[in-house]
Amino acid sequence: MKSLIDILDLTTAEIDELIQTACDIIEHPQKYSESCKGKKLATLFFEPSTRTRLSFEAAMYELGGNVIGFSEANSSSAAKGESVADTAQVISCYADIIAMRHPKEGAAYVAAQNASIPVINAGDGGHCHPTQTLTDLLTIYREKGRFENLTVGLCGDLKFGRTVHSLINALSRYSGIKIVLISPEELKLPSYVKKDILQKNHIPYEQTTDLQAALPQLDILYMTRVQRERFFNEEDYLRLKDSYILEPKKLQKAKSDLCIMHPLPRVNEISVAVDKDPRACYFKQVLYGKFIRMALILKLLEEAGK
């Protein structure tokens, strides 16, 4: 594994290895504090990000490494028209590993094909966000202790949500998974995802527009925001943005050990009153994101050094 572009680049054995490394980092942080001493991570963010970019930076610093890069396309040579391929080759001269976010699907793949160092896809348009999926998997593992035999509800924007598509892909390889798709008609999971992943892997699933009715059966509830930046039409966005708001009263019939997740940022789809509920795991999820990225950086640098 030279780079990570899609969650399917990883075998389940490799995912398990990353999760075990992340768990060891959580238990013994000092053991890893100089693992990347003398190494540099380049964060190439052509699109705004708070959690993902700072999570990568915190991960590298806590491994004893350094960080260079930019946080918007306008502050890079992309503003002058430089191609992603050329940028990747240039950055390979300065850094040991790249974390890249780009608004265009496939940009990370192009970077990986042209870089001489590992590339981590930190989100490419509506396509993939594999480190968010690894974050989600570590959260599920830490909170539930397993990936098998879980009923997972995915709620909100299932059409444009790259985190949802990637998580479905990852969970489809485990046994006993059931998926509940909760969304307005206009934001339903694309038919190709249902056909290529759920149906192909014989994953039982159901579709509903009713969040409250779906809640009692769920082990995991994965909320997503309706993303303004993925809409062509402002009217459609405004009409759908408040379709599902999770409030304490809706959780009354949910399981006592339900795990509520959200890739963040949230807008108003989870009431702040839910934050105090012990089932709310979305801020823990942020912290787990740092640990799994530490594990991934270690793995890719180790592979690149062989």
Image (cartoon, rainbow, N blue to C red):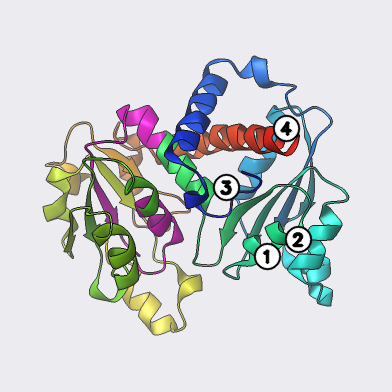
| Residues under numbered marks 1 and 2 in contact, where contact means CB atoms less than 8 Å apart | yes
Depth check, mark 2 against mark 4: the one in front is 2
Decide: few, some or many residues near mark 1? Use Cα within 10 Å; few <14, some 14-19, many ≥20.
Answer: some
Give, as a three-letter code, the residue at label 1.
Answer: Val
Q: Residue at x 18, y 32 (%)?
A: 256
Decide: few, some or many residues near mark 2? Use Cα within 10 Å; few <14, some 14-19, many ≥20.
Answer: some
Q: Earlier in the sequence, mark 2 or mark 4?
A: 4
| Residues under numbered marks 1 and 3 in contact, where contact means CB atoms less than 8 Å apart | no
Give the position of the N terminus as an image quadrant: top right
Quadrant hosting residue 161:
bottom left
Rounded to the nearest whole Å, what is the CA distance between mark 4 and mark 1? 27 Å
Give, as a three-letter code, the residue at label 3.
Answer: Arg
Q: Residue at x 36, y 36 (%)?
A: 140
Q: Earlier in the sequence, mark 1 or mark 3?
A: 3
Give, as a three-letter code, the residue at label 2.
Answer: Asn
Depth check, mark 1 against mark 3: the one in front is 1
Give, as a three-letter code, the residue at label 4.
Answer: Tyr
Q: Earlier in the sequence, mark 4 or mark 3?
A: 3
Name the spot of residue 107 as percent of width and height, x first. Answer: 64, 66
Q: Is residue 232 left or right of residue 103?
A: left
Q: Residue at x 52, y 39 (%)?
A: 289
Give the position of the C terminus as an image quadrant: top right
Residue that numbered label 1 is attached to: 110
Q: Which residues are magenta?
A: 139-168
Q: Is residue 136 left or right of residue 63?
A: left
Residue that numbered label 3 is attached to: 51
